Amino acid sequence: MKYSYKPTGVCSTRINLDVENGVIIDANFERGCAGNAAGICSLVKGMKAEDAIEKLKGIRCGSNATSCPDQLARALEKGLGQ
């Protein structure tokens, strides 16, 4: 299943995901910190979406209440209907 998510509270403007049978096939961020986003996406490819959510949810960026990894977890939850 391919879907897009509009993150809030971060520099990136969209997260695009492809999840098949609960496994992340592809992920990418539009805009934001290119190196960090590419690193996060590379790490989660091939990972079970539930495992990525568990590891990334709640990560903060400085004093912000959220971060790109946290927004990726939220995107995965929404895509999985959680």
Image (cartoon, rainbow, N blue to C red):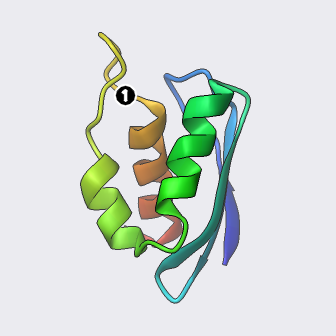
**Closer to the camera in the image, 6 or 33:** 33
Neighbour tally class for label 1: few under 14, some 14-19, many 20 plus, Cα within 10 Å: some
Q: The C terminus is located in which quarter?
A: bottom left
Which residue lies at the image location 62% right of the left edge and 31% below the top edge?
35
Give the residue displayed 41% in from the left and 52% down from the top.
73
In percent of width and height, residue 16 lies at 69, 54
x and y, in percent, of residue 52 in the image: 36, 61
How many callouts does the rendering have?
Answer: 1
Which residue occupies the extreme bottom position in the image?
21
User: Which residue lies at the image location 52% right of the left edge and 89% below the top edge?
Assistant: 21
Q: Secondary structure at mark 1?
A: loop
Residue 51: give x, y in percent of width and height: 31, 68
Q: Quadrant of the N terminus?
A: bottom right
How far across and down, in percent of the image, does residue 27 sit? 63, 57
Residue that badge 1 annotates: 66
Q: Residue at x 55, y 43 (%)?
A: 39
Rendering quarter of residue 62: top left
Residue 23 vs 58, above or below: the answer is below
Q: Nearer the viewer, residue 82 or 32?
A: 32
As drawn, 14 above or below 65: below
Residue type at mark 1 is Thr
